[in-house]
Amino acid sequence: MHEIPPLRLSALTTLRTGGTPERMLDASTTPELVDALADVWSRGDEWFVLGGGSNLFIGDEPFDGTVIRVLTRGIEELPSPHEGRIRLRVQAGHSWDDLVAHSVEHGYAGLEAMSGIPGTVGASPVQNIGAYGQEIQETLVEVELIDEGAAEPIVVPAAELGLGFRTSVLKHHYGSVPERRAVILSVTVDLLVATERVVRGEQLRRALGLDSDAPVPLTWVRERILATRASKGMLLDDNDPDTHGVGSFFQNAIVPEAVARMLPPECPRWPVAPDLDAVTVIPLASYEGLVPATKIEAPDVKVSAAWLIEQAGIRKGFALPRSRASVSTKHALALTNRGGATAAEVSELARFIQNRVHSEFGLVLQPEPVLLGVEL
């Protein structure tokens, strides 16, 4: 590890907010990262790790603690126990989009719809990143991590991470602490060896404009996804203020089917698949020879937060008076820093949008990024 003069966090986060930490460490290898964490934990410092800074909304005040920058990189190819597949073990600090590019270039399918997502690989399981119906949990095998205060890293199967819609047991949700406070050191995914594939999933097919089941090249999928994200201001560009944010600031709302029925029929929505493999456990002492019929409930529904925002009267490009924070001119779900906006200005805009959507539709939009030193 290397201690460096602390940099202002607004220069290291894509939303461009955040004060200067008391202390900053750089870790370029896994042993350096483990040593840096051990150092911080032994000191009892407040701390957090910083990857690409693309999913952080940090307050304006100086951070009274240590920031560890994760700069590890590398992709290792491993055999898969499944025929026609391959495993990639990737260091936590590796760029996520560089991993996707590597996979597509080598003919490994399973990540292509997540092209252009900013940030690092180590952050991907924390909030179970996804785009156009594809999520990291579909290919994730395991992670190597170190729990806070532990002496040695361990390997944890994906099934133990509590992966859900943009969440895991590792995520710092607004208003709560993670169920498991740990740092990911590497991520292993299992991918299909194929240069083209049949695209499944309504969201992805619609985004790609597909109307047939013919296989399409992975390179074509990646190019179309990157173009789509660029048109929405979701590809980082120093010269485009619409990209100076955290991507989608609010999560799409997950609501019961009965609630979704009360929304206008034109509101975009997608069913959240129910657990068809749920197991019914009957205590032996109470078993009478009959297995009760499985109660099938209507699946929850994911509804478009961007649609809710626009229908609540918040248009693309909207800004409060004298504020340097605004809704993106390209996408209603992105809050952006138009140049020198404070965290307080971004917070004020986020609260205004939440209040308008709640007033109009009775739903409270939840922030997607991790919030540090910020209140909504």
Image (tube, helix red, strand yellow):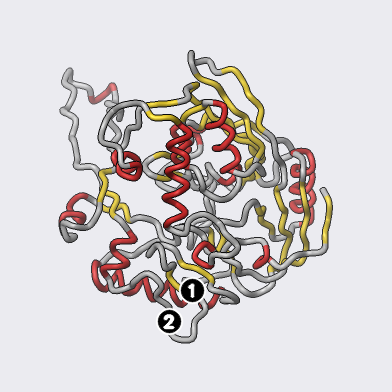
Q: Which residue is label 2 attached to? A: 320
Residue under the image location 28 percent in, 28 percent down: 213
Residue 237: percent from left, percent from top: 57, 59
Mark 2 crowd level (few <14, some 14–19, many ≥20, 10 Å Cα): some
The single residue placed furthest to the top in the displayed view is 83
Residue under the image location 65 percent in, 67 percent down: 10
Q: Which residue is label 1 attached to? A: 347
Residue under the image location 53 percent in, 46 percent down: 126
Residue 5: percent from left, percent from top: 82, 63
Please give left or right for residue 151 compared with residue 120 in the image. Answer: right
Q: Quadrant of residue 281?
A: top left
Task: Look at the numbered discs 2 and 1 and tell me whether their residues touch, using CB distance below 8 Å.
Answer: no
Q: How many marks?
A: 2
Between 135 and 219, the residue placed more toward the observer is 219
Mark 1 crowd level (few <14, some 14–19, many ≥20, 10 Å Cα): some
Q: Quadrant of residue 68?
A: bottom right
Q: Amino acid at mark 2?
A: Leu
- Secondary structure under tag 1 reads helix
Q: In the rendered image, is residue 231 in sight? A: yes
Residue 67: percent from left, percent from top: 71, 58
